[in-house]
Amino acid sequence: MRSFGPTVTAGLVGAALAAWAGSNEWVKVTAPAQVPADLNDSPATTGLALVALAAWGVVLVTRGLVRRLVAGLAGLAGIGVIVSFFGHPGIDALGRAIESEVVWGETEHTTTPWPYLALLGSVLTVAAAVAALRLASSWPEMGRRYDAPATAKAEQKPLEEQSTIDVWKSLDEGRDPTTGDQ
């Protein structure tokens, strides 16, 4: 029960950090040479982190098996961010550039902290997803009163016999009180 808040918060923070880091510059080049566009950020990281972020939002409002499945999806998205970190062309190109000055010539190039922050956020998201998969059965759930209304239809009186409150309740429930239909 006590693990719900910290676990979901860790998942949300980790996914938000990875999404933010994925949209920032991953390799900084100070030179007159043109920086290849695929080195500056990681759209795959941002996209996967946003999937994880949305999944954590769903974990907040679901229960049971659905909650576990969505937590698993958040974990898979976090693993995808980790994979995109190690397979990012900027990290790979920077390594090749350091080994060979042919690629960059006399330029100075460094990796910014953003890819490492994305990695940290994704590891936090995966850890929270593992905890959620283990502990979700003991977490509190939203009450059934927040579920969609049941399909059972109440008997409706003709408009002339309804009070003003009954008419407004019909409108709140999505029914037309003037038709006499359910």
Image: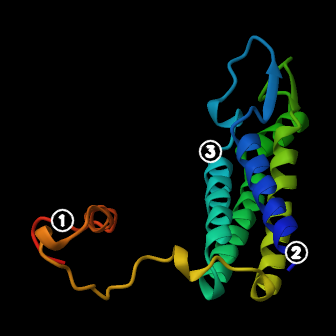
**Image quadrant in which you'd find residue 27:** top right
Q: Is residue 8 above or below residue 155?
A: above
- Evaluate whether residue 52 shows in this view: yes
CA distance separating discs 1 and 3: 47 Å
Q: Which residue is mark 2?
A: 3
Question: What is the spatial separation of the Cα atoms under label 2 and label 3, in whole angstroms?
Answer: 32 Å
Q: Element under label 2?
A: loop
Q: Nearer the viewer, mark 1 or mark 3?
A: 1
Q: Position of residue 112 (x, y in %)?
A: 86, 34
Residue 168 image position (x, y, % from top left): 30, 61
Indicate the position of residue 4 as horizontal and vertical percent values: 82, 73
Q: Residue at x 16, y 73 (%)?
A: 161
> Which residue is at 77% across, 53% downward?
85
- Where is residue 165 shown, x and y percent of the image? 32, 64
Q: Amino acid at mark 3?
A: Pro
Mark 2 surroundings within 10 Å by alpha-carbon count, few (fewer than 14), some (14 through 19), many (20 or more): some
Q: Disc 2 vs disc 3: which is toward the camera?
A: 2
User: Mark 1 packing: few (<14 Cα in 10 Å), some, or many (20+)?
Assistant: some
Question: Which quadrant of the figure contains the N terminus?
Answer: bottom right
- Quadrant that contains the C terminus: bottom left
Mark positioned earlier in the residue sequence (1 or 3): 3
Q: Observer-nearest residue: 64 or 141?
A: 141
Q: Amino acid at mark 2?
A: Ser
Q: Secondary structure at mark 3?
A: helix
Residue corresponding to mark 3:
43
Q: Earlier in the sequence, mark 1 or mark 2?
A: 2
Looking at the image, which is closer to me, 147 or 91? 147
The residue that label 1 is drawn on is 176
Q: Residue 169's image quarter?
A: bottom left
Q: In the image, is 137 to the left or to the right of 101?
A: left
